[in-house]
Amino acid sequence: MLIPTLIAISMIGQTSRAQDRMAWWREARFGMFIHWGLYSILAGEWNGSKGHAEWIRETAHIPVAEYERLLNRFNPVKFDADAWVKMAKDAGMKYIVITSKHHDGFNLWDSPYTEWDVMSTPFHRDILKELSEACKRQGIVFCTYHSIMDWHHPDYLPKRSWEGESWRQSTVDHLDLSNYNPDYSKFVEYLRNEVRTIIQRYHPGVMWFDGEWENTWTHAFGKPLYELCLKTDPNIIVNNRVDVFREGMEGMTSNDKAAGDFGTPEQTIPATGMPGVDWETCMTMNNNWGYNAEDHNFKSTKEIVRMLIDIASKGGNYLLNIGPRPDGTFPDESVQRLKEIGQWMKINGESIYGTSASPFKSLAWGRCTQKRTGGQTTLYLHVFEPPKDGRLIVPGLANKPVSARALSSRRDTKVWREGPDLVVQMADGTGGDICTTYALRIEGAPIVFDAPEIITESSRFVNPVHVKLKANPQIEIRYTTDGSDPDVHSKRFDGDLVIRETCTLKARSFHNGKPVSGVSQIAFEKVKPRPAKDVVPQKPGLELRLFEGDWNKLPEFYFETNFRTKEIANFTLADDPKKEYCGRFYLGMISIEDSDMYRFVLRSDDGSRLWVDGELVVDNDGLHASLEKTGAIALAKGWHQIAVEWFNKTGGADLSLKMGALGSEPKPIPDGMLRH
Ligand code: FHN
């Protein structure tokens, strides 16, 4: 298994208090996200153009003066805070995160700092006040989502490039903007004032920031905002989007100075758990966060519940979104899903709430969560694919079984040991279509005989590669490189293993001289490095082709003909202050000092691709915040072609390329290695 490098999310001021703050949130595991505002009125359509949602002012290019006319149309007469909270509670959700302000800058509460709020609408009621009070009445934790990016505030920067000077036509707050020079520091003061007031008035359990990706927002603002939240309420929890080190939609933080208490994967579930890391996957029920009348592509209840289980089995929280209609009701499909989810949670909630991640790396038939109870542990076995013979194998578990019970019937069932495994006898017809859950109680903390992890940077190599084998402390690891399964006579792993030739490495866990796990394996391949080009480039640096355009993914720059060229020393954006609606194509050659397998780390906002000798080595294409991807290629000593494509649509812009031979930390490429 190739273990990605991930620095656990840091928690500024990580203390026992931080642990206390997180306790309710870790117990909760399941919350409701609500995206609601003026955009909901448009229901995804503008002048015949459809497919929009909460981004509609941007995606349909609605001038601010026209958008402000929505103020007079916001009157959700059917809004009933208690009904909303009850639906969340009955679905088994323990907290609600609602948009106090989304990117359009509209405040769903009575803001003392602007009239761009719900009190300027015919509805004229403080929605955050009503919802926070309903949450308190029903024992649900009230939380708020607050966007840093603000397409309305006169001091926010950058302005939308498509709107030119029309932002000056805003009439809310009766400001004369005709000659106004936006001052971002005034916007930051406005943002901080609003955040402080929201915390003081409505006491949210979580401040869920978003819209942190534009290059005006920096760590210099993010960390102080995090500290302001905690100064205002020492018990509040703040997500990692308060700062600027979130890795795109993967949502995790890879910088140890970052502020924030939990990572925020969006529309995605991490492949594995991350021990010691708090994270929450946020996800839509259909395809949109805000209401879109035509979007009926709702996930099934089975999909949603299995995602909740998968997330909990990896130690995360699930924040499931509702996009209410403009009249204040939830879409029918959302209501139905919430009801059905609640039916499952009513029987199986104990297997989610307060649990921690599975002790198993993977289970062929489903997922597992666990909960300590005194000197024992309850393992919740969520069976997605029941074994045909009804014998549920719990692989490589050394602990003594105490009991096993089907949650749906509350009836005990048999459990016994077979070698390194425990076997639970599944009862007939329990659990329904979503999944059958068993509570397996064992003595002590789980001792799992997992197959060893094979930790290596790359399974393809030029020079001998070092490999680590990792398993639980009590385990002895034995391995082979001749393709045979390891047995008690195979080589014992003694801390370091060097692979010198193409082979299949197999590893197995042993305990008291007996095999107690399956076999993990990786095929290693010794590869020939790509031969160097027989040219010696003369000019230092790279050729850079510059393009203008509006893309959502990389075009084929190689075949584009309309561009400007210049020379540049390295793969950098430092020469261009603009960086919006533009593309770049860097071409040149790189000097390789020693034949080896080289890793390249390409970071960009938005999309990028790295080619070496015409081979695509890293594909980091797409519309995304600053995100890095890696790739590897074997290169012989000498000169090789290298090319990087990059584009940016709007907002933040970023490009960096690092490289390093296997076994070394990738570093920026020195200018002297680049010529064209
Ligand atoms: O742009 C927002 C989007 O509208 C929505 O609020 C999601 C939910 O987390 N966050 C941003 C997209 O990453």
Image: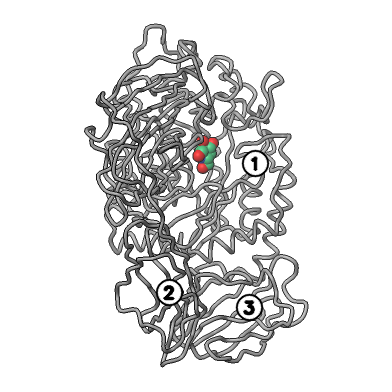
Q: Quadrant of residue 366?
A: bottom right
Sequence-first disc among 3 and 2: 3
Mark 2 sits near ligand 1, with its Cβ under 8 Å away: no
Estimate the x, y position of residue 427 in percent, counting from the top left.
73, 83
Residue drawn at 50 percent across, 54 percent down: 141
Bin the neighbour count of mark 2 within 10 Å (Cα to Cα): few under 14, some 14-19, many 20 and up. many
Q: Is residue 434 above or below residue 637?
A: below
Quarter holding residue 591: top left
- What SS does tag 3 mark? strand
The answer to whether the residue labelled 2 contacts the one labelled 1, judged by CB atoms less than 8 Å apart, is no
Which quadrant of the figure contains the N terminus?
bottom left
Q: Amino acid at mark 1?
A: Asn
State the residue position of label 1: 287
Label 3 vs label 1: CA separation?
A: 33 Å
**Front-most of residues 120 and 506:** 506
Q: Position of residue 613 (x, y in %)?
A: 41, 37
Badge 1 marks a residue whose secondary structure is loop
**Mark 3: few/some/many CA within 10 Å (<14, 14-19, 20+):** many
Label 2, label 1: how many angstroms apart (C-alpha)? 47 Å
Q: Which residue is mark 2?
A: 481
Residues at marks 3 and 1 touching, judged by CB atoms closer than 8 Å: no
Local secondary structure at mark 2: loop
The disc labelled 2 sits on which kind of residue?
A: Thr
| Circle 3/circle 2 CB separation < 8 Å | no
**As drawn, is 204 to the left or to the right of 59?**
left
In the rendered structure, the answer to whether residue 465 lies left or right of residue 300 reads: left
